[in-house]
Amino acid sequence: MILTKNEEAKLLDAMAMKEYGIPEMVLMENAGASVVRLTEPFVDWDDAFTVILCGTGNNGGDGFVAARYAAGLGAKVLVLLMGNEAHMSESSKLYRHTAEKMGIPVIPVSKAEEGAPYIHEADILVDALIGTGLSSKVKGEKAALIGLVNEARGIIISVDVPSGMMTDTGRAAGVVVDADYTVALGSIKRGHVLYPGSSYTGRLLYSPIGIPKEARLDFPVHLTEKKDVFNILPVRNRISHKGKNGFIGIFAGSDGMEGAALLAGQGALYGGGGKVAVVTTAGAARVLAGRIPELMVSSLGEGPFFTEKDAEGALEKAKAYDVIAIGPGLGRKKETGQFVKKLVTSFAGTLVVDADGLFALKEENVRLATCPGRLILTPHVGEFAHLTGLSPVEIEERRIDAAIRFAVDNHVVLVLKGAPTVTAMPDGSAFVNSTGNPGMATGGMGDTLTGIIAALAGQGMNGSTAAVAGAYLHGLAGDLAAEKTPVGYRASDLAELVPAARAEVMKTGR
């Protein structure tokens, strides 16, 4: 499913009308109808006092249509209209007239207090006040009206986007409707899934409003859905064996940071890797050996951390591996950075680089675009800030675009972890993950994801699809864990649920 900016959403509407000949009135009719039909399973419209707040843009036109459909389900409907009526489109004017002909009261208001008695008594409030075209701070009477809506007791349904939310970023333009449900029209907007927009949106529902699938083909950013992952996950046949499912080599851990290596290895095992080898320091290997019987544990060197002199031995081991993961728990010694640089600039296969490996890439000035392998980088915001020089605030303000820019400039697959995780590709496309929950904000989750992605790559997936599927399964496993323990489950608990998450995805095709 495509994920659009405001300008892209406008382009999509224009394409539907100009290239496919769909009249604006048809799109508006479909939009308003969808607001009621999609919420019907969750909202009891029958006999509900329903107040629909309409602005004078096309979002308000959608609201007038919704008023008719709500009345058709037995709701007692009233419309509050705020704004300069001279700005209304012909389609909006027509649907207003139709609503009035049906006996639905339309009450123009210039001050918020004029609508207060109706808003306070409403069972259902439909927010069709502003829509996606917002470009400046909401103030004055519209801001006051939004404040009244947020204080009301009724269920709040926003049309397309919560009024006051910036479409591209999800940020509040002063004040924003805090919706219980939002019905996205034509496309999911970036603001719906980016924080804090995801919290204003409430439960997100979606209607294509009749825009053809063909009109959506050239938009670069997508929201990852279960069906997307189903279509790319490898399926094992009866003659499959461990040699066909990838030999994963994980260079991780150091003395005192053994756990990161164990979690990455565990992630690779539960991610379906055929064979998984953890290569670590001598001291860490003694701690890890036998902890998980299915993990092959070996060591390089005799020191407490890897150094450049260990690199030749690592590359010799790497000849046996289909995929390498490197970084978790390595530490940030200069000598370790040189070890990482040697591996990353020499290995020609798929490499997943995380944690201290990412630190080394920056400190050792590794030119990512010239590396012979297929690189998948998995930074969290702090690590991405170190890689790019951007501040965490700057990254969060343009999380999707910053990820894409880095992936394109450096010819890598970038998995920018967070809420939400963005997987950006060298071709300028990106997938925004739709799974995961706040309970995943705990130590070791990133190490587990590293192992999962490496395992999927070892099963024949390319770097891009392995990263997209890995992020989705990782988040879905977290969601399964949160069903029993919303907060307090561990990375190792999540790893054990990855097979269940994979099974859940595969049900899609049944």
Image: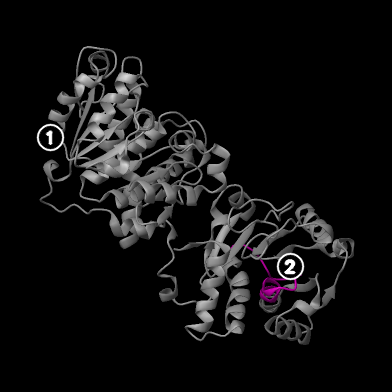
In the image, is residue 47 part of the stretch drawn in magenta? Answer: yes
Say which label, 2 or 1, has the lower sequence index: 2
The residue labelled by disc 2 is: 48
Q: Is 157 a magenta residue?
A: no
Colour setting: one colour
- Distance from label 2 to label 1 (Cα)? 68 Å
Q: Is residue 164 above or below residue 318?
A: below
Which residue is labeled 1 in the image? 319
- Element type where label 1 sits in the image: loop
| 317 to the left or right of 195 | left
- Check disc 2 and report its element: helix, strand or loop: loop
Quadrant (top left/top right/bottom left/bottom right) for the C terminus:
bottom left
Residue 153 found in image quarter: bottom right
Residue under the point 74% across and 78% down:
88
Comparing 397 with 455, the one in front is 397
Where does residue 301 sit, x and y in percent of width and height?
Answer: 19, 16
Residue 41 visible, this orientation: no
Residue at image location 31% in from the left, 15% down from the top: 255
Nearest the viewer among 412 and 208 is: 412
Under mark 2, the amino acid is Ala
Q: Quadrant of the N terminus?
A: bottom left
Q: Is residue 15 above or below residue 358?
A: below
| Magenta segment boundaries in residue numbering | 42-63
